[in-house]
Image: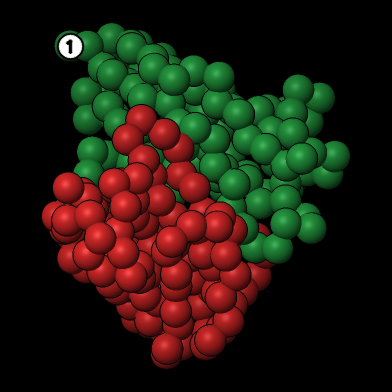
Chain colours: A green, B red
Amino acid sequence: AQSVTQPDIHITVSEGASLELRCNYSYGATPYLFWYVQSPGQGLQLLLKYFSGDTLVQGIKGFEAEFKRSQSSFNLRKPSVHWSDAAEYFCAGKFSGGYNKLIFGAGTRLAVHP
Amino acid sequence: SQTIHQWPATLVQPVGSPLSLECTVEGTSNPNLYWYRQAAGRGLQLLFYSVGIGQISSEVPQNLSASRPQDRQFILSSKKLLLSDSGFYLCAWSSGSFNSPLHFGNGTRLTVT
């Protein structure tokens, strides 16, 4: 079955530290992959997306993600976290044969310590 | 540019009352439209999606329904709310191409009391 997994429910980092949020997908073919961010009580904002080509994609707010086919992963990274990055992050994928539906991971809540 | 509007932003309704949440999209035509629900501490669950006027697909059997009376209008309804219907409801749109992302509204916080 098509699925997206985010193994970490909560992550806490110090401001200025680097960040990596994990995402794995389960499917035979490469899906289209996305990362979204959600601030409390708000909708979801698209950070970046991967379809094909260069496996390192750049997004907004200084985020980047790397697609690794061998690990079925699409981890989100940021070199230096700011307090304003505290939010919930969702990895999502569109899978061929799944119509145009976006399947979400459970999300990772990021807390940033000053 | 395209924009998506959802209302109301918050809603408190008693059990057994009806529900109507509305979503409209501007700046695009024939969008794919989606309703997601986000329960407290949980991820996003796709409830309904629509590829055109009057075309609704349901993902999860429940006491909710959706309608698309106009190209850029998507409505989520219930005849009788349950406590378990409480949650954060998000509307989203995308273009028809498979590689297009979903763009989300700001959501409606529904509390059923």
| Residue where numbered disc 1 is placed | A114
Quarter of image, res A100: bottom right
Residue A58 position in % (x across, y down): 52, 40
In this view, the residue in front, B41 or A107, is B41
Residue A43 position in % (x across, y down): 31, 51
Q: Is residue B78 left or right of residue A50?
A: left
With respect to residue B19, does A46 lie above or below?
above
Residue B13 position in % (x across, y down): 17, 58
- The residue depicted at 33 percent of the width and 77 percent of the height is B24
With respect to residue A8, does A99 lie above or below?
below
In this view, the residue in front, A105 or A11, is A105
Label 1: few (<14), some (14–19) or many (≥20) C-alpha neighbours in 10 Å? few
In this view, the residue in front, B102 or B45, is B45
Q: Is residue A49 visible?
A: yes
Quarter of image, res A54: top right
User: How many marks can you see?
Assistant: 1
Q: Quadrant of the N terminus of chain B?
A: bottom left
In this view, the residue in front, A103 or B1, is A103
Q: Is residue B93 visible?
A: no
Kind of residue at disc 1: Pro
With respect to residue B98, does A19 lie above or below?
above
Q: Chain of mark 1?
A: A
- The residue depicted at 17 percent of the width and 11 percent of the height is A114
Q: Is residue A74 left or right of residue B73?
A: right
Q: Secondary structure at mark 1?
A: loop
Q: Is residue A22 left or right of residue A108?
A: right
